């Protein structure tokens, strides 16, 4: 089942006189339960793509549908409404509110939707248990490690069962152990809960956890790799070689 | 890129950001200039009899300078810190520190002296308005003239130039201490602030509330008789001040976060957007501003309190003049009164004369006294007694006694029951009467008949009896020539004319003119009220600006948080509502604490100043609240911009 459909999306920055076209007609389809990776050289437009797909930024041209809802023409208020019900986010620099405890941070998306307290607490217990941060619940972000912060951020993305989770370089700031921990957790969430994940990454290891990797170059889709039944190791090798070609082309 | 270009560009950017600073600067200059203009205005010498208006204003202008100077220096520390990144960047591109200092000084010079001259211009226009207000308060019929005072101009430029030099010295030391490293330091301080609440903070929070409550309690007991003598009162006042100030500090340092933490704990992690933006942020931030908030709260409580007290006495000028002298004019010496009445007849001013025979009697209040603070339980005292026939429309039964002139001030010091036995001692025995009524209404001039306790009214027959058996040692009058005569004008609008006659005749003491009390108190209290109001306004504006600047910093530190929240699906409207909620606390807590402090301060001693507390006090508080709220609103507008730009 198609959960997200982007048609010919363009994004330009700047004004009339000084235009920079960052996305140049991208078509992308994501199915329910997919774990999609987006890779590409620096400045190729990955973050921009993720931002427009997740409604944080607006496209200049083109349409995007999530669960059959076209949202590119929506007003800011509707967009916010849309985000809080359908989307979850994990960011590279965690984006936790440092005045809130781990638990308060994670429950934030639930309080927007006005879920009952009892249900909210149940959800929290479940997600935090799965991500192994239950004992941290009364700590402040300043008191926990980077990996723990990132898992908190992930828990916040999962807690309200969004249709799609967007992750921008979630492992960028982590050491390889914490990174693989987090990726394992994400992969588990993906398979157990059928959570759809779209993740931008620079790291081929991280990308190898995905079921599909989309390569971007100069604002266009360059190629895609499907994992299929391959092992993670051979998928990793494929990614590395594609990256080599891609990198070679850009330089 | 030339230096001039950088200066101009910075200036443009800064004026936009610091419009409020520039405004506050212009405003303070204007206030100061017009204040000093008043001081040198010849019209001021006519104001005030017991004190020279000009001198009073001159003395308080020193205070004004202190407030303004502290404000400007403090604001400068806020702004220079905000620019430490910029300074680091200049260093990085190779500018020397001296060069950077020159750059900042030049920028400040334009900004500062530009505002100075605009301020002087505004002050010139304003001085007339202010003089008009002063004349209105003092009820002086005179046209305020616009007059440019070179002395005031000189003084203003000099004072603000000195402040400018101080600011430059401060900037210089700041830049010298600055290294390129500061470029990479994050401005956010929340990281260090946010941690679990330690036990001592909870204790501190409870202590803070306890101290304030204790201070309030002592203040309510201040004049109840528990503290006697000048030393006792002094000590009590110092204790109150110490308790309240320390309590306020601890309140900001601990109580606020303690209370907020309790509320937050009860939510068990499930916070609404309002709570996210207000509770969690204020909890951590208010304590880092504890000292500043304590100073602001204390000084504003002081200003509100003083302003309320002076307004109370200004407001009740007429009633307190009546307390001092219940009739338009009062005479004791026979010929003085006769001369005056003759002159009134000549000028065709209608009047009635009230003869009130008085007698001094020793009496014992015994069981009427509620709390006794008489030494050795000796509850006898000396008082003036009059007959009920001297009072129109009052009939006291034989065997009964009424106490008049039992004013608020008296009530607070000497608590009486409204019934009980009063014993009058005569030369030949005791006459017992029952107390029937306590009345605030004065019947004789305070200095003549009042004294320690009001005037006692008895039935005509009892008065005769007391007179017959009077103790000659107590009577300070020579029979026949001393007798109180009150004169009431038929048409009160002629009082000024009558008062002029009174002044011309200069009758010897004891003689009383209600109008004299009235104008004396009006000019004295009006002038005090004017000066306190002036200083209070300056303080209000400067402290409001400081709070606003602090909020400006805070909003920028929290901007990342707004980005996150908006990404999560909160709308700008949601965030703005949360911020309004937060500002309600940020500005509301210091305001409410300040108002409470001044309420208790005023309540403890207002009765010495006038006859009506609530109306004048609420007027002052309402005006203060409205002006103060403006800064809260401005800060919300600033937040609105930050929120809009956060995604
Ligand atoms: N707000 C913006 N205004 C103008 N240009 C922008 C803006 N955001 C991004 N760009 C430009 O768009 C291009 C793509 O940026 P983007 O952040 O999407 O790259 P990226 O692929 O995420 O790179 P990286 O791997 O380094 O994160 C860049 O050239 C950048 O300069
Ligand atoms: Mg990026």
Image: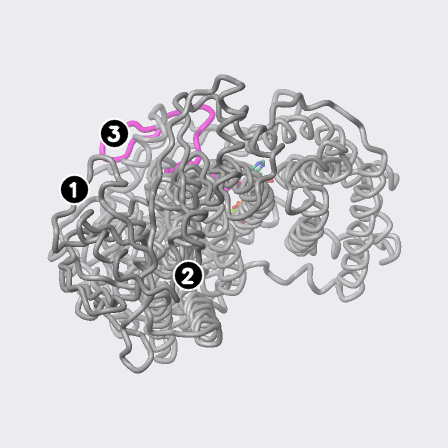
Q: Position of residue A195 (x, y in %)?
A: 23, 51
* Residues at discs 1 and 3 in contact (Cβ within 8 Å): no
Q: Quadrant of residue B567?
A: top left
Describe the element under mark 3 as helix, strand or loop: strand
At label 1, counting other C-alpha atoms closer than 10 Å, the crowd grade (few under 14, some 14-19, many 20 or more) is some
Q: Report whether B466 appears left or right of B624.
A: left
Q: Magenta residues, as a range?
A: A43-71
Describe the element under mark 2 as helix, strand or loop: loop
Is disc 2 on the same chain as disc 1? Answer: no
Look at 32% across and 29% down and name the residue there: A71
Subunit under mark 1: B
As rendered, which of B514 and B487 lies closer to the eye? B487
At label 3, counting other C-alpha atoms closer than 10 Å, the crowd grade (few under 14, some 14-19, many 20 or more) is few
As rendered, which of B602 and B467 lies closer to the eye? B467
| Residue matched to label 1 | B395
| Residue matched to label 2 | A98
Q: Position of residue B118 (x, y in %)?
A: 75, 31
Subunit under mark 3: A
Q: Report whether B579 appears left or right of B145.
A: left
Does the rendering let one see residue B190?
A: yes
Q: CA distance from mark 1 to mark 3?
A: 90 Å
| Residue matched to label 3 | A69
Q: Quadrant of residue B283?
A: bottom left
């Amino acid at each position: 089942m198609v959960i997200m459909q982007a048609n010919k999306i363009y994004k330009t920055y700047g004004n009339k006189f000084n235009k920079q076209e960052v996305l140049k007609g991208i078509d992308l389809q994501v199915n329910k339960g997919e774990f999609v990776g987006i890779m590409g050289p620096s400045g190729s437009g990955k973050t921009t793509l993720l931002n427009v797909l997740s409604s944080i930024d607006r496209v200049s041209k083109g349409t995007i549908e999530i669960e059959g809802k076209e949202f590119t023409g929506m007003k800011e208020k509707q967009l916010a409404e849309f985000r809080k019900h359908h989307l979850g986010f994990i960011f590279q620099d965690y984006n936790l509110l440092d005045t809130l405890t781990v638990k308060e941070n994670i429950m934030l998306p639930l309080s927007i939707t006005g879920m009952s307290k009892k249900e909210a607490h149940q959800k929290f217990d479940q997600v935090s248990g799965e991500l192994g941060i239950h004992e941290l619940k009364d700590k402040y972000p300043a008191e926990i490690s980077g990996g723990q912060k990132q898992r908190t951020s992930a828990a916040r993305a999962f807690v309200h069962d969004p249709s799609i989770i967007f992750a921008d370089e979630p492992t960028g700031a982590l050491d390889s152990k914490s990174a693989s921990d987090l990726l394992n957790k994400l992969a588990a969430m993906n398979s157990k809960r059928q959570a759809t994940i779209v993740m931008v990454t620079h790291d081929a290891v991280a990308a190898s956890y995905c079921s599909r990797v989309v390569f971007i170059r100069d604002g266009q889709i360059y190629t895609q790799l499907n994992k299929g039944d391959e092992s993670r190791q051979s998928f990793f090798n494929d990614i590395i070689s594609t990256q080599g070609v891609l990198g070679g082309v850009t330089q | 890129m030339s230096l001039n270009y950088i200066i101009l560009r910075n200036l443009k950017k800064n004026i936009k950001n610091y419009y409020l600073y520039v405004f506050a600067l212009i405003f303070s200059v204007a206030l100061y200039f017009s204040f000093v203009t008043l001081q040198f205005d010849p019209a001021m010498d006519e104001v005030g009899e017991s004190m020279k208006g000009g001198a009073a204003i001159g003395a308080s202008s020193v205070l004004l300078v202190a407030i303004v100077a502290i404000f400007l220096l403090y604001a400068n520390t806020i702004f220079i810190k905000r620019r430490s990144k910029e300074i680091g960047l200049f260093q990085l591109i190779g500018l020397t520190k001296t060069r950077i200092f020159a750059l900042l000084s030049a920028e400040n010079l334009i900004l500062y002296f530009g505002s100075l001259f605009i301020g002087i211009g505004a002050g010139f226009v304003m001085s007339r308005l202010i003089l008009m207000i002063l004349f209105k308060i003092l009820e002086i019929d005179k046209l305020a003239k616009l007059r440019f005072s070179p002395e005031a101009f000189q003084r203003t430029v000099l004072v603000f130039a000195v402040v400018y030099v101080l600011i430059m010295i401060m900037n210089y030391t700041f830049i010298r201490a600055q290294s390129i490293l500061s470029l990479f330091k994050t401005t956010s301080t929340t990281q260090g602030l946010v941690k679990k609440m330690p036990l001592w903070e909870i204790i501190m929070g409870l202590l803070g509330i306890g101290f304030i409550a204790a201070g309030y309690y002592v203040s309510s007991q201040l004049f109840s008789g528990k503290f006697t003598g000048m030393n006792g009162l002094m000590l009590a006042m110092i204790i109150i001040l110490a308790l309240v100030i320390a309590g306020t500090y601890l309140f900001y340092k601990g109580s606020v976060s303690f209370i907020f933490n309790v509320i937050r704990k009860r939510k068990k992690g499930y916070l609404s957007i309002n709570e996210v933006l207000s509770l969690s942020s204020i909890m951590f931030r208010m304590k880092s501003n504890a000292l500043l908030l304590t100073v602001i709260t204390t000084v504003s409580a002081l200003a509100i309190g003083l302003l309320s007290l002076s307004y109370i006495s200004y407001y009740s000028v007429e009633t307190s003049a009546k307390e001092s002298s219940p009739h338009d004019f009062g005479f004791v010496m026979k010929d003085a009164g006769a001369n005056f009445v003759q002159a009134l007849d000549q000028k065709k001013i209608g009047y009635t004369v009230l003869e009130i025979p008085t007698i001094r009697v020793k009496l014992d209040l015994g069981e009427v006294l509620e709390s006794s603070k008489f030494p050795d339980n000796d509850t006898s005292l000396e008082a003036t007694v009059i007959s009920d026939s001297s009072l129109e429309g009052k009939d006291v039964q034989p065997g009964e006694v009424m106490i008049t002139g039992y004013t608020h001030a008296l009530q607070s010091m000497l608590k009486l029951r409204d019934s009980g036995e009063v014993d009058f001692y005569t030369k030949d025995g005791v006459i017992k009467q029952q107390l029937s009524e306590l009345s605030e209404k004065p019947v004789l001039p305070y200095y003549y008949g009042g004294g320690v306790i009001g005037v006692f009214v008895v039935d005509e027959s009892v008065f005769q009896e007391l007179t017959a058996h009077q103790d000659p040692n107590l009577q300070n009058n020579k029979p026949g020539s001393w007798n109180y005569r009150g004169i009431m004008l038929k048409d009160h609008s002629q009082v000024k004319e009558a008062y002029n006659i009174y002044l011309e005749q200069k009758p010897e003491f004891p003689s009383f003119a209600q109008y004299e009390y009235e104008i004396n108190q009006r000019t004295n209290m009006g002038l005090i009220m004017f000066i306190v109001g002036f200083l209070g306004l300056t303080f209000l504006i400067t402290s409001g600006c400081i709070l606003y600047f602090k909020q400006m910093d805070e909003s920028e530190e929290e901007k990342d948080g707004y980005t996150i929240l908006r990404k999560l699906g909160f709308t700008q409207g949601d965030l703005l509502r949360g911020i309004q909620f937060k500002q309600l606390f940020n500005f509301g807590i210091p305001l409410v604490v300040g108002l409470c402090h001044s309420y208790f301060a005023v309540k403890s001693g207002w009765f010495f100043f006038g006859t009506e507390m609530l109306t004048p006090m609420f007027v002052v508080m309402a005006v203060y609240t409205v002006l103060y709220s403006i800064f809260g609103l401005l800060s919300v507008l600033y937040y609105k911009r930050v929120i809009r730009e956060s995604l």
